[in-house]
Image (cartoon, rainbow, N blue to C red):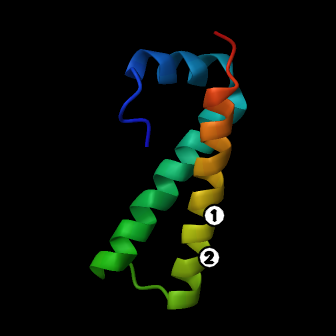
Amino acid sequence: MFEGQPQSEIEALMKANPEFKQLYQQHKKLNKKCMDAELGVLPISDGTLGQMKREKLLAKQRLLRMYENRPN
């Protein structure tokens, strides 16, 4: 998600902000579940998959907002 950003900045933000870290881990977990579901490894309904994708998107939007508003 933060491919263009230095990993050191992301790690520093995770250390400094527990909410960012928790949200980052939640997004990562949701991303894996969505990928597994799309590959057929995780059997879930389309409705559940849609809900997980919405949650993942909301987490990503919050993470990006937190990253952009971080103290420099």
Residue 42 place in picture, x, y as percent = 38, 78
Q: Quadrant of the N terminus?
A: top left
| Residue marked by disc 1 | 55
Q: Quadrant of the C terminus?
A: top right
Q: Is residue 41 visible?
A: no
Residue 64 place in picture, x, y as percent = 60, 39
Crowd around label 2: few <14 · some 14–19 · many ≥20 (10 Å): few
67 horizontally vs 29: left or right: right
> Could you say which quadrant of the image residue 3 lies in?
top left
The mark total stands at 2
| Residue marked by disc 2 | 51
Amino acid at circle 2 = Gln
The residue sitting at 63% across, 28% down in the picture is 68
> Could you say which quadrant of the image residue 12 lies in?
top right
Tag 1 near tag 2, CB within 8 Å: yes
The answer to which of 42 and 6 lies nearer the viewer is 6
